[in-house]
Structure formats: C-alpha cells, structure tokens
Image (cartoon, coloured by chain):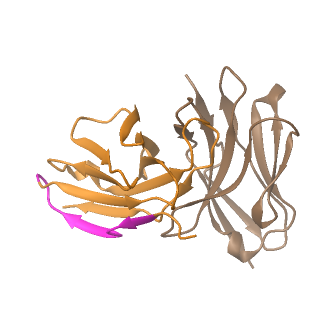
Amino acid sequence: KAGVTQTPRYLIKTRGQQVTLSCSPISGHRSVSWYQQTPGQGLQFLFEYFSETQRNKGNFPGRFSGRQFSNSRSEMNVSTLELGDSALYLCASSLDRVKAQETQYFGPGTRLLVL
Amino acid sequence: AQSVTQPDIHITVSEGASLELRCNYSYGATPYLFWYVQSPGQGLQLLLKYFSGDTLVQGIKGFEAEFKRSQSSFNLRKPSVHWSDAAEYFCAVLTDSWGKLQFGAGTQVVVTP
C-alpha cells in the first residue's frame, strides 16, 4: 500500500500570499489530520477531518483552513502568509476516527518558507 | 490540561551502547501514548504505542517502552543503538476521542562511532 503523500514537498512564498497544500491519505483511510512543526513551537495540531467534516480544530487563526473531499484527500489553505508560517506541515491519516486509538500514519511533509 | 514533557533535548550515545529516552505525561484518565521517530527531511514514523494491558510494549527497530502510571512516565529504550538510529524522537499522548495528538518537544539523538 502506498503511504501518505503530500504535495508539494517544498514551497517558497512571500508575505501576504496564500498557499494550498495537498494530502492524499493511505487508501481506505477516512481521517486526515494536519500538524505544523516549527523549531520554536514544535508539533502543533491544526485540524482533523473525517468523512469531509472537520471534527477537531487546534488553536490557530482563521487564516488556516482546510477541507476534505469525498475521496478523503485533504487540502489545507493558509491565507495572508506571515513569516511565522514558515514550517513543516505534516499530514497524518488513519483508518477510522470512531476508534480514537487508531494509529495515525504521517506523510513526509511540505516545507513552506515564507519570505 | 494534558501535557507531554521530554526532559532531554539532546542525547549523544555511542554505537552499540544502550539508549533510554524519557517521557513524562500529565493526563487525567488512562493515557494513550505513542513514540514516533523523525529522520532528517522525513515525516514521523510510529515506533510503538500503549493503550492498555502489558506495560512493557515492543515496537519496531528493536525499541521498547515501559508505561509506569505511578511515575507518569513512558520511557523508550533500545539495548544497542545503530548509527541509523540517529534521529529526533517524539513522545505523544492522545488528548481526545477524535485523535488529537499532543507531542513533546522531542529529543535529538546523535550516534557516535
């Protein structure tokens, strides 16, 4: 089975622009979570989607948004980029969100640099 | 509030020596605990997890972890490290029924010849 894939892997943007990142979960997985990783704040939860519904959201401003499609693929969008948004954005998928202890499998991440 | 603490930011260990990474958690109920490893430029790979039952958990790559409720700890161990074990290691706790993970700050492991 193919793992979680994220595109693009690297991205450079300038302040004020917006960006869309994509995540394709493992086949059959219906839950997708997004995390931001920075040297200063570490790994922080952004949001989680299950069957196209946002079930959970972390403490990020409204500039960060996401969605999930019927095939479970997910996108996250960051509008009005700030320098502090430079980070590695990780996507994780799991089989079933009804059972919270389902293992989450992470993708390689998208490294975003905001200049 | 739930929290995860990894007291050691950086550990240097000789190849072939044993390794122990510390993790302490603060959580009201029975915690679901995880250890992930991240190699440079890579995502996170699950090493092992604890939900219930036997407090000594075996994982991949020869790692094991022991859950100690009395000490609120979930330390990761490996008897003999290999150069390929150089990476950053994260302890995490599941904080709600929807699968939100809270991670520790991570421990960077350097393996010397």
Q: Position of residue A8 (x, y in %)?
A: 31, 69
Q: List x then y, in percent, for residue A39.
A: 43, 52
Find the residue positioned furthest to the front.
A70
Residue shown at 80%/35% (left/top)?
Answer: B52
Q: Is residue A46 visible?
A: no
Q: Which of the 4 image quarters holds residue B11?
A: bottom right
Residue span colored magenta: A5-16
Q: Nearer the viewer, residue B38 or B17?
A: B38
Chain B colour as displayed: brown
Residue A61: percent from left, percent from top: 26, 35
Q: Is residue B44 visible?
A: yes
- Residue found at x 67% / y 50%: B35
Q: In the image, is residue A18 part of the stretch drawn in magenta?
A: no
Quadrant of the rendered structure where residue A14 is? bottom left
Q: Residue at x 75, y 30 (%)?
A: B72
B80 and A90: which is toward the camera: A90
Q: Colour of chain A?
A: orange
Nearest to the observer: residue B14 or residue A10:
A10
Front-lying residue, B80 or B113: B80
Vertical relation: A40 (above or below) B19: above
